[in-house]
Image (spheres, rainbow, N blue to C red):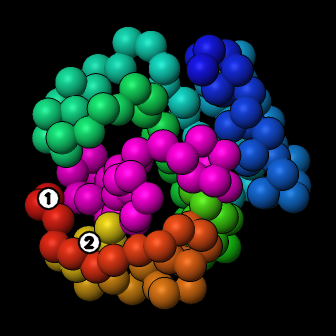
Amino acid sequence: MDKEVLKRTIYDIVSDTVEDKVTSYEGFSRLSCKYFTFDIETEDIIDVSFIREEYKMEINVEIGIQLFGKLFEAGLEVLFRIFGNILCAFNPDLVFVENGTDQIFRKEDTTVIINTKLDQYQRKYLSSYLITLLRYPYIFKELPN
């Protein structure tokens, strides 16, 4: 998919899911709403070779997300709805990493793999409800961090 079409499609998915104003900047490379900011990187991805090697996945787009503290829980729910909508729209392989290293979950082929090796804070916010918002079959498995 063309990179500009991809960014526009992600913007549409985010806008439809957030149900509130989503502002785009820099040609849909940065999306912002009351819950978070998305930075969509399709070119010059500094970490892409590391990510490909570290997680053994063919990653070609990196999305950096910053959730806003005051609306963290509501934003997290919206974020997982967005992930589910992206999975349904593109069926991509995907890895969701916190702080650049900790795999929270990954989607390979047709299954989401939820990491069982999470710290107390990660387990607290990765509820069964949020996992079901991904709308994909899932399994629990220890993933390397």
**Residue, disc 1:** 145
Instruction: State whether residue 54 is above or below residue 112.
Output: above
Q: Residue at x 57, y 52 (%)?
A: 87
**Mark 2 neighbour class, 10 Å CA radius: few under 14, some 14 to 19, many 20 or more:** many
Residue 43 in sight:
yes
Q: Residue at x 87, y 47 (%)?
A: 21
In this image, 5 relative to 96: left or right?
A: right
**Residue, disc 2:** 115
Quarter of the image where one finds residue 29: top right
Residue 65 screen position, x and y as percent: 50, 46
In this image, 56 relative to 65: left or right?
A: left
Quarter of the image where one finds residue 4: top right
- Judged from the image, the secondary structure of the residue bearing numbered disc 1 is loop
Numbered range of the magenta stretch? 85-112
Which residue occupies the foreground of this view, 41 or 23?
41
Kindly give the residue lying farthest to the front in the view shown.
110
- Judged from the image, the secondary structure of the residue bearing numbered disc 2 is strand
Residue 125 screen position, x and y as percent: 44, 80
Which quadrant holds the C terminus? Answer: bottom left
Q: Does the residue at mark 2 contact the one at mark 1 (Cβ under 8 Å)?
A: yes
Type of the residue with mark 2: Asn
In this image, 76 relative to 128: left or right?
A: right
Residue 51 in sight:
no
Distance, label 2 to label 1, CA atoms, is 9 Å
Q: Does the magenta stretch include residue 97?
A: yes
Which residue occupies the foreground of this view, 66 or 40?
40
Residue 105 screen position, x and y as percent: 35, 63
Residue 27 screen position, x and y as percent: 71, 16
Type of the residue with mark 1: Asn
In this image, 8 relative to 48: left or right?
A: right
Instruction: State whether residue 39 is above or below residue 85.
Output: above
Kindly give the residue lying farthest to the right in the view shown.
20
